[in-house]
Amino acid sequence: MSGPLVVLVGPMGVGKSTVGQQLAERLQVAYRDTDDDIVAEQGRAIADIFVEEGESAFRALEKQAVRRALAEHDGVLALGGGSILDADTRALLSGLRVVYLSMDVEEAVKRTGLNAARPLLAVNPRKQWRELMEARRHLYEEVATVVVPTDGRTPEEVTQASLDAL
Ligand code: S3P
């Protein structure tokens, strides 16, 4: 097996799950999401892992989950928004078709707002989004073979734009 047909990266709330499922349906392949893998394996919510063990413990679990999914899955794979922070993970993505679903900060604030299930946005979402995007944008761009902007677009439009770009 040569890895997933398509990997989706991008910030939380950008629509990776929705677009990923639509893409998988259109391409007639299976959909997988590393956040779901972690929740299933751990038997608890991601927010609980953050609270109980901290972010770095979560990142270690995420790194393993991504490595496993890249080796096992040949359909559409969505990665958690922070998985590209890890250099080994970024290296594993080289040679794959990686779609970066992008959005600007205001769109991100509008879409996610205050969301307790997303531990990285617990306080002052606008400031946190700005910092998050500044820290990560270049990493998403580094791994991406295609960038698909999502601002003001419906998931269906983003799915179509992704298919057109592949
Ligand atoms: C995170 C994104 C989340 C989840 C966790 C941390 C991040 O995944 O892995 O809350 O660091 O951006 P989604 O991008 O699937 O929401």
Image: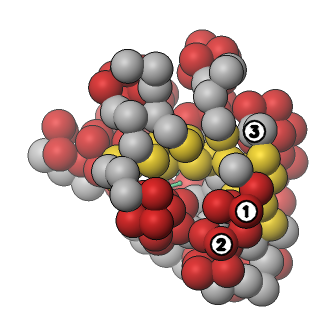
Visible residue check, residue 123: no
Q: Secondary structure at mark 2?
A: helix
> Could you classify mark 1 by the number of other residues whose Cα lies within 10 Å: few (under 14), some (14-19), or many (20 or more)?
few
Q: Nearer the viewer, residue 97 or 150?
A: 97
> Residue beneath label 1, please?
164
Q: How far is the residue under mark 1 from the one under mark 3?
A: 15 Å
Q: Nearer the viewer, mark 1 or mark 3?
A: 1
Q: Which mark is residue 93?
A: none
Question: Which badge, 3 or 2, comes first in the chain's sequence?
Answer: 3
Amino acid carrying label 2: it is Gln
Q: Nearer the viewer, residue 3 or 132?
A: 3
Mark 1 vs mark 3: which is more N-terminal?
3
The residue positioned 38% from the left and 19% from the top of the image is: 1
State whether residue 9 is above or below residue 87: below
Q: Is residue 7 above or below residue 64?
A: below
Where residue 102 appears, as percent x and y from the top left, is 76, 60
Colour basis: secondary structure
**Identity of the residue drawn at 45% across and 47% down:** 76
Label 2 CB less than 8 angstroms from ligand 1: no
Q: Are marks 2 and 1 in contact (CB under 8 Å)?
A: yes
10 Å crowding of disc 3: few (<14), some (14-19), many (20+): many
Distance of label 2 from label 1 (alpha carbons): 6 Å
| Pointer 2 residue | 160
Residue 144 is tagged as 3
Circle 2 residues within 10 Å: few <14, some 14–19, many ≥20: some
Q: Quadrant of residue 50?
A: top left
Q: Is mark 1 within 8 Å of ligand 1?
A: no
Q: Is mark 3 within 8 Å of ligand 1?
A: no
Tell me: residue 77, above or below residue 61.
Answer: below
Image-based side of 159 in relation to 148, left or right: left
